Amino acid sequence: MTTQPDAPAPDQPTQARTGERIAKWLARAGIASRRDAEKLVAEGRIKLNNAPVAHPATFVSPGDIVQVNGRVVENPDRTRLWRYHKPDGLMTTHRDPQGRPTVFERLPPTLPRVISVGRLDLNSEGLLLLTNDGALARQLELPATGWLRRYRVRVHGEVSEPALRDLARGLIIDGTRFGPIEAGLDSRKGSNAWLTMSIHEGKNREIRRVVAHLGLAVTRLIRVAYGPFQLGNLERGEVAEVQARVLRDQMPK
C-alpha cells in the first residue's frame, strides 16, 4: 500500500518555509512591531508579490516584494539605534488625531523610517531611543530586559525623604501596582526640589502618578538614561546614532 503524504493543516500556508516570517521582516523594516504587523496581516493590508497575505506565518524570501497599504517596503537595513533629545511639547506618535506636533515630524529628513523605544508624554523631555527595527524596540521595552529608566524630576511641594525611600518597596495606586522605584532628593530651594528617580517598567505616566501620590506636583520631567544609553550633552532636538559595536556590546544577553 502506498502511503500518501500528510496534507498541510488548513490554517497553515502551503508555501515552503524559507526566508523570514513576514511579521518579523516588517518589524526589522521599521514598519511596526511584530504584534502590530500581525494585525496589519489580519486587516488585509499586506501583499507579498502582489498577492494578499492571509496568514502571519507567511515567509518572505530574498527578491520578494512586500507592500503595506499599496506601498512597496524597502528591504530591512541593518539594525540601527539612535539617541534623540526629545523637547517637551511633542507627541511620541507618527500621527496625532488632535493635530499636535509629533516627534517624527521634527526628525532630520536624512533618517530612515524609525520607531521609538517606548514613549515620552507630551510634556516630558529628554532621552528617547529610536530604531529602524521593530523587534529590537519590543525587546528593549520589555521589563524582563532589566534596564533602568532614570529621570530628573523637578517638583513643587514639601518633599519627604522617608517617603522617597519607601518607594523602593513598590506601591499600589488606584489598583495599579508599581514596582520598586529608586528615588532620592538632589537639591531643594524653597518649595521646589529636584529628584532623581529610576524605574524598571515604565508604565503609562508612572513617574507623574507616583509623584502626585506623594502630594507633589511635577513641573519638569527629563529622562536622562535608558539602560546603558545616556542623554549626555545632546542638545534639544539633536539626534546621534549609536555605533554598531556599542549597540552589539550593550544588547541584553
Image (cartoon, grey):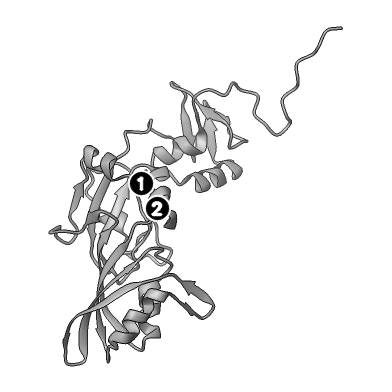
Q: Is residue 73 left or right of residue 12?
A: left
Q: How far across and down, in percent of the image, does residue 68 sit?
A: 48, 39
Q: Residue at x 37, y 74 (%)?
A: 168
Image location (x, y in percent) of residue 78: 31, 34
**From the viewer's perspective, is 54 left or right of 148?**
right
In the image, residue 154 sits, relative to residue 228, either above or below, namely below
- Judging depth in this view, the residue of 45 and 198 nearest the camera is 198
Residue 225 occupies which quadrant of the picture? bottom left
Residue position marked by numbered label 1 in the rendering: 252
Q: Amino acid at mark 2?
A: Thr
Residue depicted at 79% across the width and 13% down the height: 4
Q: Is residue 227 left or right of residue 53?
A: left
- Earlier in the chain: of badge 1 and badge 2, it is 2
- The relative height of residue 104 versus residue 182 in the rendered view (above or below) is above
Residue 70 visible in the snapshot: no
Residue plotted at (21% across, 92% down): 191
